[in-house]
C-alpha cells in the first residue's frame, strides 16, 4: 500500500473519512454537542481543508482496493499565515456560527488572533503544519499513521513539523519519532518535530554539491568545463522542460533522476544566476552519502533566460564584469496615498526567501534600537518600531536596455539580455505618507553596471505580460498609487576577493553608470573623490572580512567569505538593508515636504492670506510626524557609525539644505502675507471709530425711533440706515478679529514645532 496524493476526485471521500475519524473527538464534542449538527459541520470543515491542502500539494493518503483508508493534511504555515488570512481564520479562528473554536482548548484571556500569532512565532518561516491525520478504524495500530507522518517529515526535511492535537492516545506516535510534546491545557497538546536536515554548517563544507535536472543542464550552464558528476534517484521532485530549459518542481510523491555535481562557490553562483533565483526556492537535501543543494521552480517562467544577441556580442569584451554575480537591492523613497490599498495589493502574494527577509527586517526594527522587547500592545505607538509595516508586492519582470538616444527616442534602447524577474518589497510609515519600495535581485542575472545605469537615468523598465514595456515609476503609480520622492539607492554585495574587482570597475559602479571598456567613449573614471575612495583597501568597512565603498547613490560591499546559502546571506545583508531603509524614510520625508512646498508656491497659486497660513500649518504638521526617523538611536556603536557614514555618503544633508531653502521661500511668502494682514488690520481702527460715531448718532436718534409723530419719519429712516451700517461694520470687524486669532494660534504652533525640532 503506497502513499499517494489525494486527487480532486477523492476529496469528498477524504472528507467523509475525516468525519468518521473525528466525530467522537472530545474537542469537537465540546464544540458541537449535538451529533447530527456536529457531523454536518465537520463535513463542511474537512471538505474545505482537503480542498485547500489538496491544491497546495498537502493532501496524501493510503488506499486499499481503491478505497481511502488513511489520510494526512498539511500545509506551509508561514505561507498561509501571510498570504491567505481568510483561510487561516477558517482553520484556526471562528466557526461558522461566529463562536470561538479555541475557547474550548485554551484560556479565554487569549484571543483567537493572538493565538494565531503565537503559533506563527512558534512556527517561523520554515514550518510544515500538520492539520489532520486519520486512519479508518479497522486499519488502526498497523503503523499507517506513523508512515504518513514520516512521509511528510522526509518530504520537507528543512522544515519543522508542528501540530496541535486533542487525542491523548496519539501522543505515543509522536514520542517515537522524537517530537517535543507540550501540554497546553487538559487533553490539548502541541507537538513539534525539528528539521531532519539542517543546512547550518554547509558554508564550511569542504565540497559543495549541486543537484541539476540532467547532463544537458550541466553543459548548458558550465559549458566545456570538466565537472565530474554522479546520477541519483531523488524523491519529492519531478523535472519539467519548457522554453526556459529544465527545472525541478517540488512534488512530494514524485521521484526523478538528477545529476549530483561538485561545484565551486563561483559555479554555484553562476547556476543561481542562470536559473534566476527569483523564480526558485533553495533546499538542502541528503542522498547517496552526500548533502547537496537543490533549486526548484516556484514561479512560472517560460522564456529563455539570460542571453540574447546583443548580450552575446557585448560579452566578447565584458567577461570580467559578467563574472561578477552580486546580490542587488535598490531602494526607492516614495510617498503613498492609501495604506489599505497597499495591504490589498500584497494579499495572496508570497515568496519563501522574501518572507524570511521581511522577518529579518522586522527583527532589526525591534531589536536594533532601544530596549529589545516586542509587546502585543505597544505602549508607545509613535515609536518608529511600531509604525513601520512591510509588505511583499510580488514579482515583476525587468528588462535592461541600452541608454535612450536621440535616434532611439521613440523606440527606446535595445534590450541587453533577456527579461528577468525581481521581487518588490514595500515598507511604510503608518503615521505619515512616507515609504520605501525595494527591488531585490539575488545573484543578479543582468550586467551589473547596465542594471545600475538604467536606474540612475530613470529608465528602469518593467516588461508587462502583453510584451509592452512601462517605466518603473509609472508602474508604481498605476499599480500601487505611490510616487517617487527622492533618489534611489543601490546596495550591492559582490562575493569576490577584493583583488578580483579592478579599481576602474569599482569606480564606475560608484558612479552607478556603465563600466566602459577600452575603446568606448568615456573610458576610466578619474574623478578625484571616487579614486580616493576605491584606493582605500577596506573603504568604510569596520571588520576585516569585508570591503565597503559608498558614494552618492550606492553602497558596495565586497567579501569572498560571503555566504552562498540563501538563508545565511540574506541574514548577512538584512543589516545594511535595514540601515538604508531608515535613511530612505528620512529622504522620503524631506523630499515629500519639499515637493509640497514647491507645489504650493507654484505661480498659479493665487492663495489668500488665510490659505497660506492653513497650508503652512498642514505641511509642517505632516513633516513633524517623521521626527522619529531623523536621528534614530541604534544600540551598537558600529551600527551608529554605519548609519552616519551612509548618511554622509548619500548626502542626506544636501536634501535638508534644499528643504531649508524652500522653507525660507515659504517663510517669505508667509511674511509678505502677514504684512498684508497687518496693513488690512490697521484699517480696523477706522472701522472702530466709525462704529462708535454711529453709536453716538444712534443715541441722538433713538428717542425719535419709538415715537408716532410724523415729524420724526426722516429721522427714523436715517436711524435704520445707520443701524444697518453699524451691523455691517460689526460683522466685518468680528471676522477680521477671528482671522487674526487663527493666524496667531497657527504661528504659535509653528514656533513650538521649530523649537521642538531644534531641541531634538
Image (cartoon, rainbow, N blue to C red):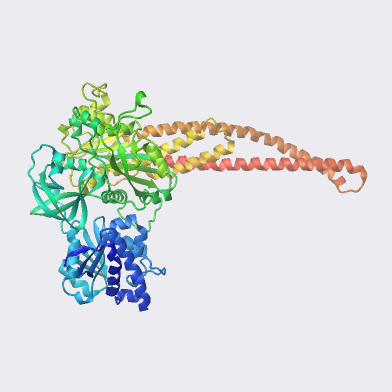
Foreground of the two, 521 or 219? 219
Drawn side of residue 292 relative to residue 276, left or right:
left
Image coordinates for residue 179, horizontal then vertical, percent: 18, 66
- Viewer can see residue 558: yes
Q: Identify the image quadrant of residue 56.
A: bottom left
Single out the residue that lies furthest toward the front: 65
Foreground of the two, 591 or 420? 420
Image coordinates for residue 294, horizontal then vertical, percent: 17, 49
Viewport quadrant of the N terminus: bottom left
> Which residue is painted at 36% across and 23% down in the image?
406
Q: Identify the image quadrant of residue 681.
A: top right
Single out the residue that lies furthest toward the right: 710
Drawn side of residue 705 relative to residue 51, left or right:
right
Q: Identify the image quadrant of residue 661.
A: top left
Viewport quadrant of the C terminus: top left
Q: Is residue 337 above or below residue 49?
A: above
- Viewer can see residue 533: no
Label tally: 0
Image coordinates for residue 12, horizontal then vertical, percent: 30, 67
> Which residue is painted at 55% across and 31% down in the image?
604
Single out the residue that lies furthest toward the bottom: 34
Image coordinates for residue 288, horizontal then vertical, percent: 8, 54
Amino acid at each position: 500500500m503506497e502513499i499517494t496524493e489525494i486527487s480532486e476526485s477523492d476529496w469528498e471521500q477524504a472528507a467523509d473519512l475525516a468525519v468518521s475519524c473525528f466525530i467522537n473527538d472530545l474537542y469537537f464534542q465540546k464544540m458541537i454537542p449535538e451529533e447530527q449538527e456536529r457531523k454536518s459541520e465537520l463535513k463542511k470543515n474537512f471538505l474545505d481543508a482537503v480542498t485547500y491542502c489538496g491544491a497546495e500539494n498537502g493532501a496524501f493518503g493510503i488506499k486499499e482496493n481503491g478505497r481511502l483508508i488513511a489520510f494526512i493534511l498539511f500545509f506551509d504555515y508561514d505561507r498561509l499565515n501571510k498570504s491567505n488570512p481568510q483561510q487561516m481564520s477558517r482553520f484556526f479562528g471562528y466557526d461558522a456560527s461566529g463562536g470561538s473554536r479555541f475557547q474550548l482548548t485554551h484560556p479565554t484571556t487569549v484571543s483567537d488572533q493572538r493565538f494565531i500569532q503565537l503559533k506563527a512565532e512558534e512556527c517561523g518561516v520554515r514550518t510544515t503544519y500538520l492539520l489532520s491525520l486519520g486512519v479508518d478504524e479497522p486499519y488502526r495500530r498497523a503503523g499507517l499513521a506513523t508512515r504518513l507522518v514520516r512521509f511528510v517529515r522526509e518530504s520537507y526535511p528543512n522544515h519543522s513539523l508542528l501540530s496541535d492535537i486533542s487525542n491523548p492516545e496519539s501522543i505515543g506516535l509522536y514520542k517515537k519519532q522524537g517530537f517535543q510534546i507540550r501540554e497546553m491545557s487538559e487533553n490539548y497538546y502541541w507537538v513539534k518535530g525539528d528539521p531532519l536536515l539542517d543546512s547550518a554548517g554547509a558554508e564550511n563544507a569542504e565540497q559543495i554539491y549541486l543537484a541539476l535536472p540532467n547532463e544537458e543542464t550541466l553543459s548548458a550552464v558550465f559549458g566545456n568545463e570538466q565537472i565530474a558528476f554522479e546520477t541519483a534517484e531523488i524523491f519529492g521532485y519531478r523535472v519539467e522542460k519548457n522554453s526556459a530549459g529544465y527545472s525541478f518542481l517540488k512534488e512530494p510523491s514524485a521521484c526523478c533522476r538528477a545529476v549530483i555535481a561538485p561545484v565551486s562557490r563561483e559555479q554555484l553562483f553562476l547556476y543561481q544566476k542562470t536559473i534566476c533565483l527569483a523564480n526558485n526556492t533553495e533546499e538542502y537535501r541528503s542522498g547517496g552519502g552526500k548533502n547537496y543543494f537543490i533549486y526548484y521552480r516556484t514561479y512560472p517562467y517560460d522564456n529563455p533566460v539570460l542571453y540574447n544577441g546583443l548580450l552575446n556580442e557585448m560579452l566578447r569584451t565584458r567577461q570580467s564584469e559578467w563574472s561578477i554575480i552580486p546580490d542587488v537591492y535598490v531602494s526607492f523613497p516614495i510617498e503613498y496615498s492609501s495604506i489599505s490599498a497597499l495591504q490589498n495589493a500584497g494579499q495572496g502574494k508570497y515568496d519563501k526567501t522574501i518572507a524570511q527577509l521581511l522577518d529579518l527586517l522586522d527583527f532589526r526594527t525591534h531589536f536594533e534600537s532601544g530596549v529589545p522587547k516586542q509587546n502585543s500592545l505597544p505602549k508607545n505607538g509613535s515609536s518608529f518600531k511600531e509604525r513601520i509595516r512591510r509588505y511583499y508586492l510580488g514579482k515583476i519582470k525587468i528588462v535592461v536596455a541600452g541608454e535612450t538616444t536621440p535616434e532611439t527616442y521613440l523606440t527606446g534602447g535595445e534590450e541587453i539580455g533577456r527579461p528577468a524577474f525581481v521581487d518588490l518589497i514595500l515598507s511604510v510609515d503608518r503615521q505619515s505618507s512616507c515609504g520605501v519600495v525595494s527591488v531585490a535581485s539575488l545573484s543578479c542575472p543582468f550586467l551589473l553596471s547596465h542594471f545600475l545605469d538604467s536606474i540612475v537615468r530613470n529608465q528602469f523598465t518593467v516588461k508587462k505580460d502583453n510584451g509592452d514595456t512601462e517605466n518603473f515609476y509609472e508602474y508604481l503609480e498605476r499599480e500601487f498609487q505611490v510616487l517617487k520622492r527622492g533618489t534611489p539607492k543601490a546596495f550591492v554585495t559582490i562575493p569576490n576577493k577584493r583583488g578580483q574587482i579592478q579599481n576602474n570597475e569599482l569606480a564606475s559602479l560608484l558612479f552607478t553608470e556603465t563600466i566602459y571598456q577600452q575603446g568606448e567613449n568615456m573610458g576610466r573614471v578619474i574623478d578625484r573623490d571616487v579614486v580616493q575612495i576605491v584606493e582605500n583597501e577596506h573603504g568604510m568597512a569596520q571588520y576585516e572580512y569585508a570591503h565597503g565603498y559608498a558614494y552618492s547613490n550606492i553602497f558596495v560591499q565586497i567579501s569572498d567569505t560571503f555566504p552562498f546559502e540563501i538563508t545565511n546571506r540574506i541574514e548577512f545583508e538584512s543589516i545594511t538593508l535595514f540601515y538604508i531603509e531608515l535613511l530612505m524614510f528620512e529622504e522620503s520625508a524631506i523630499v515629500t515636504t519639499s515637493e509640497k512646498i514647491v507645489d504650493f508656491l507654484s505661480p498659479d497659486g493665487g492663495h489668500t492670506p488665510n490659505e497660506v497660513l492653513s497650508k503652512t500649518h498642514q505641511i509642517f504638521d505632516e513633516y513633524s510626524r517623521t521626527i522619529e526617523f531623523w536621528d534614530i538611536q541604534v544600540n551598537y556603536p558600529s551600527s551608529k557609525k554605519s548609519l552616519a557614514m551612509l548618511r554622509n555618503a548619500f548626502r542626506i544633508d544636501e536634501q535638508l539644505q534644499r528643504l531649508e531653502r524652500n522653507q525660507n521661500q515659504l517663510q517669505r511668502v508667509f511674511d509678505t502675507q502677514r504684512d498684508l494682514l497687518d496693513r488690512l488690520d490697521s484699517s480696523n481702527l477706522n472701522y472702530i471709530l466709525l462704529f462708535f460715531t454711529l453709536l453716538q448718532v444712534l443715541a441722538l436718534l433713538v428717542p425719535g425711533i419709538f415715537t408716532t409723530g410724523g415729524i420724526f419719519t426722516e429721522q427714523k429712516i436715517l436711524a435704520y440706515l445707520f443701524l444697518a451700517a453699524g451691523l455691517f461694520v460689526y460683522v466685518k470687524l468680528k471676522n477680521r478679529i477671528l482671522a487674526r486669532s487663527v493666524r496667531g494660534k497657527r504661528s504659535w504652533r509653528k514656533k513650538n514645532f521649530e523649537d521642538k525640532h531644534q531641541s531634538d
